[in-house]
Image (spheres, grey):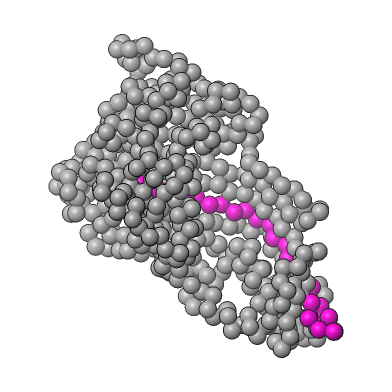
Amino acid sequence: MLLFFLVSSLAFAQSATFRVVDANSDEPVPFASVETGPGKGTISNEEGYFTLNPEGLSSRAVRISCMGYRTLELEHDRLRAQSGPIRMQPAAINLNEVRLTSRVPGAEEIIEQVRQGLSTNYPLSGKAFEIFFRESEYMQFEDLQLELEKASDLNRRALDAADKRLRKLGEDIVRSDARMFLDFKGNLAVVDDTTAILRVDRATELTDHKKGYSMDDIQARAQKIILAHLDSSQTYKVKTGLFKIEDSISPGKEFMEAENRESDSSEYDYLKGRSQGILGIASWRDGTKLRRFLDGDLYEYRFVEATYFDGNYVYAIEFTPRKRKAKYAGTFFVDATSFAVLKADYAYGRGRRGDKVNLKLLLGIKYVENLSRGTAIFKRNEQNTYDPYFIQNEYGNYIYLHRSLKFIENSRRRKKVRFDFLMEGGVRQRESVLLSPADPAEFHTLAGYTEPEKIRIQKILQYEPTIWEDTQVIAPLEEMKNFRAGKD
């Protein structure tokens, strides 16, 4: 099998975008490691693309490695001049070839060796990393109904106008391109298993704020339509079912404050929480996802193949649920010498899913976690231990929400407006992080860093590659490159 790179220079600055594809199938090869220097580099995305600036590289050559293929070194002159495919020879291994030099252990024995080597292979505390993080969020509506059911405070013309605007809002949102992309780059210090310090150097958000699609966004926009037709001199109590959610809301005050709601800042704790959350996916401490996959009481293991990665033999070990409470299936790629896991792929096993809540008849709520999958890749460092290099986690759920809101005038008249809200659809989120070791002194620098409450987020209308020029980032997927946010 042959592997080649289709290379095409983009029009911005001196960066070039490369694509890794399989020579036989032309399918993209995701997550190929691209090393531009000691501990530095990037990775191909799910479509096989990666971006770098050949003119700005410090090392003599770029090393490109992918599971099952021999490592390729491309000198800068060749990289700059390349206009056609660059071919890589596969590193297929005959299992008998491995047996000539050493006995190939069984799957259970390999996993036991992995367990025994965790503390030696994966020391993480006291380290600092350069971090690039991307969050992508999507929502697909199957149904969205917004309508007024009762309005004692509205005349027929106002009632029809409000109802028409609500129905149009629902139709527009169902048809909308509901997605959001958040990128940030900075440095992260891992103090211990539960503590980290994050400094965000730059952050961008690409979304269409005029088409907010979260449940809170939709409810707020519908509420704004209703308030536009209420008496601005009065205040209103807002209830849903038996629960009061607003005690005194004023149409006049809401309109004055609405102009100030758009913000170019975000809670620092959110960005830090997302960083720690996805870093935790690549942790091997007790209770984490990867560690649970090593629990022989929950999972059973099968030797799949011996393969080759970056000069080393690698064992591919498949894991599948042994017991009902085990939810995942996947593959560990284990170094044949150190018994370190170099890569872990996982997803819900056949017939498995996450949490499910069905209170559709009682509270108008149904929630099902129906998607969870990910990849964690580790790279050997100069101390011959392993650091997380690339982590991706994707999850999704089905949501049904039927809610009735009442606006009750705070006066003797107690006039009421009742609004019915029904939403059904799916939400999907994907988080990706690229890590590279920072200078050891950076850990001590971050230890004295005062974490802010807010971080400035640069709002963009389309992906801007020049923002990340000459930095290590994850190349955007086509869906992100092609997305355009609506202008005011």
The relative height of residue 440 versus residue 288 in the rendered view (above or below) is below
Residue 468 quadrant: bottom left
421 in the magenta segment: yes
Residue pictured at 56% horizontal, 69% vertical: 211
| Placement of 451 over or under 279, stated as above or below | below
**For the magenta stretch, what is the residue range?**
408-436
Residue drawn 36% across the image and 62% down it: 202
Between 219 and 1, the one nearer to me in the picture: 219
Q: Is residue 381 magenta?
A: no
**Residue 388 horizontal/vertical position (percent):** 38, 40
Residue at the spot 50% in from the left edge and 27% down from the top edge: 294
Residue 108: percent from the left, percent from the top? 49, 18
**Where residue 72 sits in the image (x, y, percent)?**
24, 36
Left or right: where does residue 61 sit relative to residue 20? left
Left or right: 247, with 447 as reference point? right
Q: Position of residue 159 (x, y in %)?
A: 77, 81
Depth check: give the residue in front, 27 or 310: 310
Majority SS type along the magenta span: strand
Q: Is residue 93 placed above or below 45 in the rendered structure?
A: above
The residue at 54%/75% (across/down) is 261
Which quadrant holds residue 29? top left
The quarter of the picture where the N terminus appears is top left
